[in-house]
Image (cartoon, coloured by chain):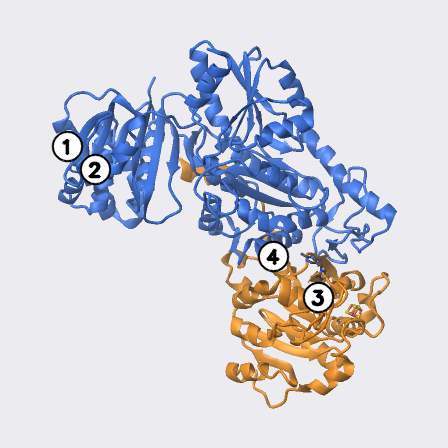
Chain colours: A orange, B blue
Amino acid sequence: MNPEEFNTKEEVTWCPGCGNHSIFMALKQALVNLNIAPDQVIIAYGIGCHGHEVNYLRTNGFEGLHGRPVPVAEGIKLANNELNVIAVSGDGDAYGEGLSHMINAARGNHNVTYLVHDNRVYGLTTGQTSPTSAKGTKSKSTPEGAIDEPINPMAMAIAAGATFVARTFAGNIQLTTELIMQAIKHNGFALLDILQPCVSFNKVNNFQWYMEHTYKLENHNPADKVAALQKALEMEKLPLGVLYKEEKPSYEEQVSELSEGPLTKKSLEVDKEKIMEEFL
Amino acid sequence: MTDFTWKIAGPAGLGIMTTGLIFSKAFSRGGYHVFDYIEYPSLIRGGHNTYQCRISSEAINSQSRSVHILVALNKETVDLHKPEMLENSAVIYDNEKMQAEVTAGKPYPIPLTRLAKESGGKELMANNVALGASMALLDYDLGILEGVIRDMFGRKGEEIVKMNMNAANAGYNYVRENFKEPFFVIAKKISDNRKYLLTGNEAIGAGAVASGCKCFVAYPMTPASSILHYLAENAKKYGIAVRHAEDEISVINTAIGAAHAGARTMTATSGGGFALMVEGYGLAAMTETPLVIVEVQRPGPATGMPTWSGQGDLRFVMHAHQDDFPRVVMTPGDVEEAYYCAAYAHNLAEKYQTPIIIMSDKHLAESHKTAEKFDHSLKIERGELIDSATDYKRYKLTKTGISPRLLPGAKGAIVVANSDEHNEYGYSCEEIENRNKMMQKRMKKLDMLAKELPAPKLYGPEDAELTLTGFGSVKGAILDAIKILEKEGIKVNFLHLIYVSPFPDKSVKEALSKAKKVISVENNFTGQFAGLVREKTGKNITKRFLKYDGRPFYPEEIAEKVRKVLKK
Ligand SMILES: Cc1ncc(C[n+]2csc(CCOP(=O)(O)OP(=O)(O)O)c2C)c(N)n1
Ligand code: SF4
């Protein structure tokens, strides 16, 4: 396989220079490296610029509602746990509209890979403040500057019980590819927050800014939850890499009805008289 | 003919629901027809709970006003239910625990608690003493009661079964010894022919299981919760994955994911929960995902009256979500229809690749009714489900509007579903021609679906003086009202709608054109159904019998209304 096989014929309409292009490249490369064919993976998308990827990436796809790719992914995985299931989201989608789903997917350890395209802005709706925008961010929805403090998705996911929590920067395609691969391979809920420049609406957090405000994690033990939380709380200079990782049975492994294979492979025929016996 | 009502009432937390169910089962197993009805506030302790069982040697469809035996677990019960008592009705109460003044019906003071303790049981077994006492009054076979108790408590051990039965025996013997005069209602066993006894929620659950539903996702909300409980309890037995998700938004999106992946999937909620699901409902329609949604109504708005009944969600459910898409809303009227609708809905959902709503209400959901054997002939039909394709188009344009459906994971194919308007492949597309074709494609499915739905049913004589009409659970009380009126020589019929969308305009128009007078019977304030009939048929039903107090219709009050309208 090669990454080209993952391209559709649709025209890619992301702005030139947008971080989505590099995330797209990294995802394709990760799938190739893992030898996952387009028909063996399904991606649930949120609504935003990130979600347009449904049109460009040649795999099974489900573009749903704003904020809801995670529950759709959970449902797909519950019905057919033989599929690789990925959810693609944006910072508005993931940490605004759909935040509760991440917390609950984490505590249930659903075997879903969660790729959040975090550009600190609402791209598709023309640049309003997002849950990861810095306090004071001026935008169309906050002309006097955002009052709210930004969310800390890393710390929040660790606290919620996520078993794989990592961060990368779209500008580093190699690292992003590597971390997407790890996230996909992880058995359980895996959050990868991908710092992404939005060239059209985020003039502050541009490529240069991320280069200056991130560093690669070294000598960090991702099995150490306290250390992971400490790293997650570093907000000035953002650590990139796997902050936290833990091995635990996934949600699907604990659903007894899946022990003999996916729901989609079960026979639908039931002894109808038998169902009614308890009502006699 | 035997037709009586037994009622147990008192504060919550005294096991009223279990005792009532035992009574219903005991008579169902003796060959009787049963319809029971419960009232309880949204509290775990306190408040006033009632469980009434109507038992009849003939088929019945609803509860009835008059109570023949009242088991009063506190003094207030005696006072509260006075209007329901007949001259000779029995009021059973614990004369050593409360001082009751029985001014309606006849007092049957029985030391329920003392007898329970003396027979070796705990205080709660007082209810069993009352059960035994009631059986003695009715001259019913205690052996049947024992069978029911054994089935319900057998798992807890023989000891518990014995304790329960000893208490029942004590009550039985006490009545035999102390109240020698025969009671005015006698209900001996009719036959050993067992019928089903189940609630509307259980019927929906069972119907779903029968149709091969393999995934159920829900968030608890009265009065829909017992569907979740039934399916969760039976999940292992039938290989159904049941997930209680974090909220209804997650529920519907999870359900859509599971259904898209290929599992027959259902969810159930009440109005408030459905309000949260509305965006997902349209997503299912847009992505052409088969899904069954059960909406069990309770009075609103907002939290409203959680444990009471109503039909005020008709217009909301019919019009939920933005823009047009095929809207299918079924409105079963009794347990048989609930079972059938649930099974059938899964077929419709997959054949037409669209969400199907089953709308019920607390009255249907939580009342037990006996039913003869169900019709199990419905075959599982999955529609155009294919297992391979080259150059697969999820939304391929076809004559019927139905595109062959391939499940994600099929070798060599890519399945793309999209919430954005999309082209045949599923990729986003907003071009004029494409938009028009896709809208027409989705809507076209409804034409074909409408043709396969059964016509609304007209119950009663063709040449009736008056026609009653309505949807859903009003059916029971109306059918029983027709019987009351028939005995008085008043001919009334009933046009019942088991689905309201797509609306069967032709048959309704035809039936109403023949009607001399029409009354729309509905559990809501504005006559939403009458409004719908007018919109779809041009027929203006001016006479409406509307009730929005959370209580179901009683056949007696419908009969009364008919007499008034007919000036009889
Ligand atoms: C329920 C709902 N509310 C609002 C919107 C409008 N909307 C579309 S995308 C979006 C925000 C997108 O921001 P983000 O998730 O960060 O994605 P990005 O465009 O930056 O990739 C909003 C508010 C919507 N589609 N649905
Ligand atoms: S608006 Fe921003 S996020 Fe959207 S495509 Fe353009 S650069 Fe990328």
Q: Are marks 3 and 4 on the same chain?
A: yes
Q: Amino acid at mark 3?
A: Ser
Percent x, y of residue B462:
57, 13
Which residue is found at the position 67% from the left and 47% from the top?
B282
Residue designated by label 4: A75
Task: Find numbered disc 3 in the image and state the secondary structure of the residue it sits on.
Answer: loop
Mark seen at residue B174: 1
In the picture, the quarter occupied by the N terminus of chain B is: top left
Query: Compared with residue A64, is residue B72 higher up or lower down, i.e. above or below?
Result: above
- Chain for mark 3? A
Residue designated by label 3: A141
Q: Are marks 3 and 2 on the same chain?
A: no
Asked if the residue under mark 1 is in contact with the one under mark 4, i.e. CB atoms within 8 Å, the reply is no
- Chain for mark 1? B
Whether the residue carrying mark 4 lies under 8 Å from ligand 1 is answered with: no
Q: Are marks 3 and 1 on the same chain?
A: no
Q: Residues within 10 Å of mark 3 (few under 14, many from 20)?
A: few
Ligand 1, seen in the image, is in the quarter at: bottom right
Q: Amino acid at mark 1?
A: Tyr
Q: Is residue A105 left or right of residue B93?
A: right
Whether the residue carrying mark 1 lies under 8 Å from ligand 1 is answered with: no
Task: Find numbered disc 1 in the image and state the secondary structure of the residue it sits on.
Answer: helix
Residue designated by label 2: B129
- Which quarter of the figure has residue B74? top left
Percent x, y of residue B15:
30, 44
Q: Residues within 10 Å of mark 1 (few under 14, many from 20)?
A: some
Percent x, y of residue B539:
66, 22
| Residue B186 makes an appearance in the image | no
